[in-house]
């Protein structure tokens, strides 16, 4: 019997045992999972970031000129270690401030474009879609455009925080939350089905790869 | 009490960082020489080709700097060859470049038939270049090799690449960003001057205090899960901002707040946030660093560890605030089974259904970002929220006008709003 398959199967069953209740086998599997994954990622980050990105970036193995801008990131990384000192631990806040500030700045335009402007542009649809050849209305596309328009406008109204949701505004917001909930319902069903396929994958591993009960 | 940082030390560190940044910028990084040709093939000698085999040449070519970029590119456009028709002789076009009018022309780009432009992205700014465009036909010879037969090509140039300060394609984007930012600044200033800013009731946020109070009454822990993304995700930043408010309440009620994290940077930031919150509430000594602890970077390893903690320690309240993926239902369902009151907030559309199904309250999308302002009541944050609402109103008006124009077939506004990434 393949020892790796055997171990994987035992660990899978150990994790599944949580469905009954918390037990020592689950705890052992959990500890192995957390410990192994933490160690794995520590090594991955060490070699990917420190060795490949930083060291080989600054001192390329082919002898070409290095990218000295990487020193800036390395120094910020070293500053993080200052938090180990009680006297100058405040220095560790600087790289954090840099990361949070740079993130907010970098993503501001990206999100503004992708989550706002391009969405607005894609919503500017004609509410009546006509067949160019016959001149008749294409009802499926017309209804689709109407649903998109009403859904986006009412959904946007729901996310107004500085105006009380009452009267026409409140009614529109209510339509918006209905649209959101129907979308979430559809998304729930879709995702549950994809999780079922993950379960089938695990079962297939247990019964085919491990026990060889199915072909 | 810790000694306040010395100004001189701070200055030295700042100067050192600036010096390193200046050094790094001064040392040129390794770059590819853009003048290097793409391929080694020279313009083929077409003198031996039977004229009837070669397609008619392109009538005219325009070469100019590629607009709205940071340089390093030249745009070549041409009129299609008269032979470029359906079923015609032209199979495509070759673009050649040389450093001088009589220099050696090397291929830099090609285009299929029917295409009348190409961009040469391997040029230096401020240097003269000359271009030729040839139309070619193609046949398979006796040895079953593809053979190109090219038309002649006139030389066009000189042309230089340069960079532009403004990308005019993004002018509308600039106007909208300035308008929204301006409204945010205006309302922040208004709020600071004492102007009232109304914020509507948000159910999930109102429940935060109640949830902390419940944990206090039961004498049990509060778990706060800030998602599985790092500090470069705005949802994590929003989650950490809310953690600050929750920590203030926990400090006030002297309830144990535990934050298991999956990213080292999130751990450090969460510790700093909680330390500040406890200090603000006058209880700095109540904060212990092990309240925020790292588990693992692995998505499902993290989920398995939290599930185990929830089942064993049975917290009274669990907060999920940040970016979540497939682990969302695993976490929320376990918390639900353990009888904890759960408040979630995320802007991940695919995970919201699970939180809505398994949690008591859920902050949907932007409510997560509004929560911090709502909880704190700080004029700066409330003003920002009001300013963003003005931005939403502008987009709402744009959508309505755009739909009306499109429906009445007056004008298509969408190309002006859509921005290429």
Image (cartoon, helix red, strand yellow):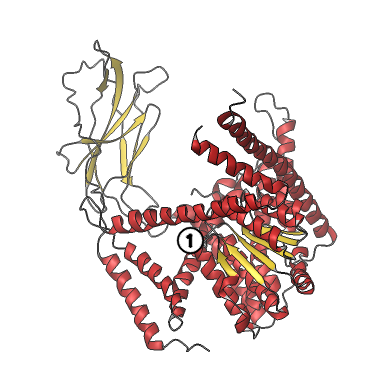
In the rendered view, does B51 fall on the left or right side of A12? left
Residue A206 position within the rendered picture, expressed as x and y whole percent measured from the top left: 60, 34
Residue B77 position within the rendered picture, expressed as x and y whole percent measured from the top left: 35, 38
Q: Which residue is more in the foreground, A41 or B326?
A: A41
Q: Which residue is more in the foreground, A138 or B55?
A: A138
Q: Quadrant of residue B279?
A: bottom right
Can the viewer see residue B292 in this picture? yes
Chain name for mark 1: A
Residue identified by numbered label 1:
A106
Q: How many labels does the image show?
A: 1
Q: Which residue lies furthest to the right in this view?
A: A167
Can the viewer see residue A116 in this picture? no
Residue at (37% x, 87% y) in the render: B8
Residue at (50% x, 38% y) in the render: A4
| Placement of B4 over or under A135, stated as above or below | below
Residue B152 position within the rendered picture, expressed as x and y whole percent measured from the top left: 23, 27
Residue B71 position within the rendered picture, expressed as x and y whole percent measured from the top left: 32, 52
| Placement of B12 over or under B212, stated as above or below | below
Where disc 1 sits, the SS reads: helix
Q: Residue furthest left?
A: B102
Q: Which residue lies furthest to the top in this view?
A: B142
Q: In which quarter of the image is residue B397?
A: bottom right
Q: Which residue is more in the foreground, B384 or B224?
A: B224
- Dot 1, crowdedness within 10 Å: few (<14), some or many (≥20)? few
Q: Which residue is more in the foreground, B221 or A177?
A: B221
Q: Quadrant of residue B64?
A: top left
Residue at (51% x, 69% y) in the render: B268
Residue at (21% x, 44% y) in the render: B36
In the rendered view, does A114 fall on the left or right side of B118? right
């Amino acid at each position: 019997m393949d020892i790796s398959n055997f171990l994987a199967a035992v660990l899978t069953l150990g994790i599944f045992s949580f469905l009954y209740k918390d037990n020592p086998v689950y705890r052992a599997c959990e500890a192995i999972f957390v410990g192994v994954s933490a160690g794995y990622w520590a090594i991955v980050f060490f070699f990917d970031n420190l060795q490949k990105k930083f060291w080989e970036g600054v001192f390329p193995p082919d002898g070409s000129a290095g990218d000295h801008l990487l020193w800036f990131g390395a120094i910020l990384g070293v500053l993080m270690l200052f938090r180990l000192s009680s006297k100058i631990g405040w220095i560790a806040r600087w790289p954090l401030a840099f990361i949070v500030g740079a993130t907010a700045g970098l993503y501001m335009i990206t999100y503004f474009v992708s989550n706002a402007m391009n969405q607005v542009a894609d919503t500017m649809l004609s509410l009546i879609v006509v067949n160019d050849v016959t001149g008749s209305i294409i009802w499926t596309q017309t209804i689709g455009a109407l649903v998109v328009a009403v859904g986006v406008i009412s959904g946007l109204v729901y996310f107004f925080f500085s105006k009380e949701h009452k009267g026409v505004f409140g009614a529109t917001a209510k339509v918006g939350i209905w649209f959101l909930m129907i979308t979430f319902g559809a998304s729930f069903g879709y995702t549950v089905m994809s999780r079922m396929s993950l379960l089938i994958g695990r079962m297939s591993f247990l019964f085919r790869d491990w026990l060889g009960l199915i072909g | 009490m810790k000694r306040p940082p010395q100004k001189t030390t701070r200055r030295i560190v700042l100067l050192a960082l600036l010096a390193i940044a200046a050094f790094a910028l001064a040392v040129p990084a390794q770059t590819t020489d853009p003048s290097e040709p793409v391929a080694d093939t020279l313009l083929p000698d077409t003198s031996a080709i039977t004229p009837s085999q070669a397609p008619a040449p392109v009538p005219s070519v325009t070469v100019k700097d590629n607009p709205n970029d940071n340089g390093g590119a030249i745009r070549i456009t041409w009129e299609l060859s008269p032979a470029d028709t359906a079923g015609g002789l032209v199979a495509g076009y070759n673009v050649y470049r040389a450093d001088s009018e009589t220099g050696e022309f090397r291929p830099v780009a090609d285009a299929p038939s029917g295409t009348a432009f190409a961009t040469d992205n391997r040029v230096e700014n401020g240097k003269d270049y000359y271009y030729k465009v040839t139309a070619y036909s193609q046949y398979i010879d006796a040895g079953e090799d593809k053979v190109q037969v090219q038309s002649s090509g006139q030389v066009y140039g000189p042309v230089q690449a340069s960079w532009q300060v403004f990308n005019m394609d993004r002018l509308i984007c600039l106007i909208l960003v300035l308008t929204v930012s301006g409204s945010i600044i205006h309302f922040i200033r208004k709020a600071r001057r004492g102007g009232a800013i109304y914020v509507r009731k948000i159910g999930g946020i109102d429940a935060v205090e109640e949830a902390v109070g419940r944990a206090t009454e039961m004498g049990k822990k509060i778990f706060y899960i800030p998602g599985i993304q790092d500090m470069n995700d705005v949802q994590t930043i929003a989650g950490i901002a809310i953690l600050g408010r929750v920590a203030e309440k926990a400090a006030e009620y002297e309830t144990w707040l535990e934050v298991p994290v999956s990213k080292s940077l999130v751990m450090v930031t969460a510790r700093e946030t909680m330390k500040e919150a406890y200090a603000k509430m006058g209880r700095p000594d109540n904060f212990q660093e092990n309240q925020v602890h790292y588990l693992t970077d692995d998505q499902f390893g993290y989920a398995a560890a939290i599930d185990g903690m929830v089942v064993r320690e049975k917290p009274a309240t669990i907060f999920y605030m940040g970016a979540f993926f497939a682990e969302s239902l695993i976490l929320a369902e376990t918390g639900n089974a353990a009888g904890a009151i759960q408040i979630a907030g995320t802007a991940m559309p695919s995970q919201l259904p699970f939180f809505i199904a398994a949690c008591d309250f859920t902050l949907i999308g932007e409510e997560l970002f509004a929560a911090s302002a709502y909880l704190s009541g700080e004029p700066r944050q409330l003003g920002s929220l009001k300013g963003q609402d003005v931005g939403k109103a502008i987009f709402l008006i744009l959508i309505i006008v755009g739909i009306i124009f499109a429906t009445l077939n007056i004008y298509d506004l969408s190309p002006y709003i859509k921005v290429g990434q």
